[in-house]
Amino acid sequence: MNAEKLISEIIPPLKSTESGNKALDWMNEFRVSHLPVVRGNEYIGLISENDVYDMPDPSVSIEKYFHNLPNPFIYSNRHAYEVMKMIADLKITVVPILDENNEYIGCADLLFLMSQITAVVSIKEPGGILVLVMNNHDYSLSEIARIVEENNAKILSSYITSAVDSTEIEVTIKINTVDLDSIIRTFNRYDYVIKATYAKGDYQNDLKRRYDELMNYLNM
């Protein structure tokens, strides 16, 4: 799942000409502590409720007091895990999302991300990870699952990533065993290209660390 699929249909950006009071009203309405600030399609930065509370006069426009807002963002083609990481690392409640032209197209919010988290809960489970590379038209999850199941294993989760303007995709699968040797041999026999394998390595630990960081943040 890429960041574009996480864009909220509810939370609008704040225009730089809007007041601090308007920012607080929207934060309360949408249950967030941050909002993206834009000028047209240009992303200016991310304002927090603490920023607004520090305004000498919150009835005036945001642009009068803030000329260098922090501007964290994620490109629309980046993976959902990177949205999770940014939320956990920066302790923010929305992540602005930009297109390849650096124009603002929306934001991912914490509540919607949590509604999607069940898709990646399997990162907490033990197992191995394979990263396969193939052309988009060659992708068949049922075929991949059949190969895994031939070796008495099952796919716990999977996701696809791809570069902009490329027909090549990477398919990452989480399997319920750390013994991947026979599965790898079978994929090789069917001429699949295996980019990387992780039985007990850093990839698994990193995903779990990101998940735990997000959970710790939510429990603060």
Image (cartoon, helix red, strand yellow):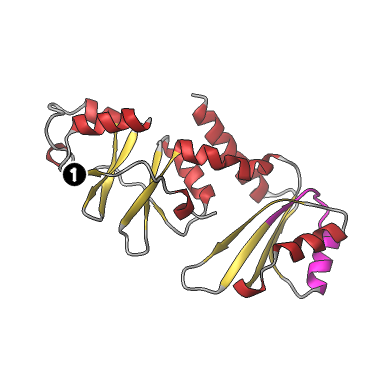
Residue drawn at (69%, 67%) of the image? 140
Res 28 → quadrant:
top left
Please determine whether, in this image, residue 48 is positioned above or below residue 152.
above
Q: Decide if residue 89 is on the left or right side of residue 55.
A: right
Q: Amino acid at mark 1?
A: Ser
Name the foreground residue: 21 vs 162.
21
Residue drawn at (63%, 41%) of the image? 208
Q: Position of residue 167 (x, y in %)?
A: 55, 74
Residue drawn at (52%, 50%) of the image? 80
Q: Decide if residue 158 is on the left or right side of residue 154.
A: left
Res 160 → quadrant:
bottom right
In magenta segment, residue 184: yes
Res 16 → quadrant:
top left
Please determine whether, in this image, residue 167 is positioned above or below residue 114.
below
Q: Position of residue 74 (x, y in %)?
A: 41, 52
Q: Position of residue 151 (x, y in %)?
A: 87, 58
Q: Which residue is mark 1?
A: 16
Determine whether the residue tagged by mark 1 lies in a helix, strand or loop. loop
Magenta segment range?
Answer: 173-189
Q: Residues within 10 Å of mark 1 (few under 14, many from 20)?
A: many
Name the foreground residue: 84 vs 155.
155
Q: Decide if residue 73 is on the left or right side of residue 208.
A: left
Residue drawn at (21%, 33%) of the image? 22
